[in-house]
Amino acid sequence: MTLASPTQKFQQNRAAAAANQSDGGEVEMSFFDHLEALRWHIVRAAIAVLVFAVGAFFAKGFIFHDLILGPARPDFWTYQMFCKASHLFGGTGPCDDSVHFIIQNREMSGQMMMHINTSLIAGIVLAFPYLFWELWSFIKPGLYPHERQSSRGAVFFVSVLFLLGLLFGYFIAAPLSIRFLVDYSVDPTIQNQMDLQSYLSTLTTMTLSCAFVFELPMIVFFLAKAGIVTPEIMQLYRKHAIVVILIVAALITPPDVSAQVIVTLPILLLYELSIYIARGVRRGAAAKLNAEMSD
């Protein structure tokens, strides 16, 4: 009689769990089985990030010239749209002379290391839907059947909100911050020559901050499912939430009132949307309870 290896045991338990779940049953996995499952989820996620990072590394021209350095040029889409909008209201608008500065590198290996780090960041961003799917695949077997049913589409909505936040940060928040910081001067004789690391840090911070802030509705959804957040609590502390949102907008934007207002408005809308989501979760829980009591 031969003993099964830990890997074979893990595969057998996962197969048994899958078979039982399909029949409506449950199978308890040991602590080491959970660790083994988590390890493979992490391995697959790391492979996905590496694949996208390698692709981004070889797409250097598009990643740097078109995407990263796009907001540093006056012909960037956002600046042109603000220029047209300003003209509609009779102003001159931030047109072709709005962004003029030099991005420079001061370290011998600076551009090479920046290329590698940027490729890794791009790999994480591009693989984000798959990363969340791997995380959800690890969490989902531990949920009750009705919880899995009510959480259908979680990966899709999290990915969509992340993409919307990413686009908002890249096309709205980041260009406004860059333009303000470039135009700001304490003396006309001082020229703005931005370090590559500083520019990229500003761009990625603004973009990724908006991407994660836009996940607020899904965060509220899961907290409401857990009974931690209710619509009454969110309405009661709405004024406090507005203050927190203003502080967050001030932290991720420069001290420019227009930029802070533009960033604050969508976050406020997301907060109001989250209240409706919390109400929907509670109505669903109440309907389920009534159905169980009637049965």
Image (spheres, helix red, strand yellow):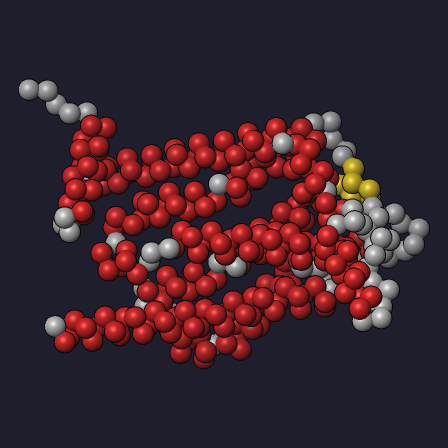
Residue under the point 37% across and 43% down: 134
Residue 72 is left or right of residue 202, and the answer is: right
Up-down relation of residue 101 to residue 2 (above or below): below
> Image check: 236 left or right of 247?
left
Tally of marks = 0
Give the image location of residue 95, x and y in percent: 83, 56
- Residue drawn 31% across the image and 45% down it: 138
Quadrant of res 183: bottom right
What residue is rendered at 52% in x and 59% in y? 214
Does the image show residue 282? Answer: yes
Outermost residue to the top: 1
Asked if one can make out residue 246 in the rendered structure from this viewpoint, the answer is no
Q: Position of residue 293 (x, y in %)?
A: 15, 75
Q: Quadrant of residue 295?
A: bottom left
The answer to whether 53 appears left or right of 217 in the picture is: right
Q: Is residue 22 above or below residue 284?
A: above
Picture layout, residue 107 above or below residue 253: above
Quarter of the image for the N terminus: give it: top left
For image coordinates 48% across by 62% down, the residue present is: 216
Q: In the figure, is residue 196 to the left or right of 151? A: right
- Residue farthest right in this picture: 189
In the rendering, at what x and y percent does residue 198 appear? 71, 44
Indicate whether 74 appears above or below 280. Answer: above
Q: 118 or 284, which lies in front?
A: 284
Coordinates of residue 248 in the picture (x, y in percent): 59, 63
